[in-house]
Image (tube, helix red, strand yellow):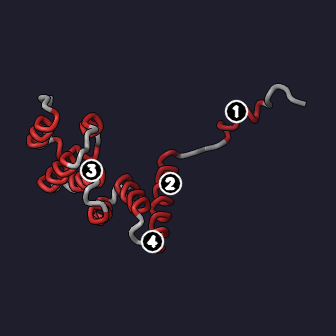
Amino acid sequence: MPGKPQPFVRNFHKFIDVDKADADERHLGFEIELSRAALRVRPDWFEALTMLGHALTKSGNHRQALAVDGRLTKLRPDDPIVHYNLACSLSNLDRIDESLDALKQSLELGYKDFSYMLGDPDLDNVRRDPRFKKLLERRTGKRQP
């Protein structure tokens, strides 16, 4: 007979102890392993490589993420997001000159999400360089703060 939900059903979340950091780490591990499994079947599967690159970056494996991003630029040399992600990986490794080059390439190919770029933590290192502001000023026509 339908009626008022039982208190234990309504408050079930109180009984589930979830450690967010552990859950995030397990999720990234799952994405990494799933991507690698997919790539064993299709080594140039763009979506699997993209997922792997993002998961490696989020888990702090920046050297591996850079290798994936390098592979993606060979698969899709005209994709602005691929070059943007390459710039992020290079920035995370403090390879500023190369990051700026990849970012410039991304912008030349049509990347336009400037507000995201200004807040993306993966670009923190490159944003400290005065050349970053100049690059954006040339692209947007607006003076950067």
Q: Residue furthest top?
A: 4
- For image coordinates 17% across by 41% down, the residue present is 127
Question: Residue at 53% across / 46% down in the picture?
Answer: 19
Query: Which residue corresponds to mark 1?
Result: 11
Q: CA distance from mark 4 to mark 1?
A: 44 Å
Q: Nearer the viewer, mark 1 or mark 2?
A: 2
The residue lying toward the viewer, choosing from 58 and 15, is 58
Give the residue pinned by disc 3. 80
Question: Sequence order check: which comes first, mark 1 or mark 3?
Answer: 1
Which residue is at 14% across, 53% downward?
101
Q: Secondary structure at mark 2?
A: helix
**Gap in angstroms between the C-alphas marked 3 and 2:** 27 Å
* Of pointers 3 and 2, the one earlier in the residue sequence: 2
Q: If you read the primary sequence from the N terminus, does the residue marked by circle 1 or circle 2 appear first?
A: 1
Of 29 and 106, the residue lying toward us: 106
Which is in the foreground here, disc 4 or disc 1?
4
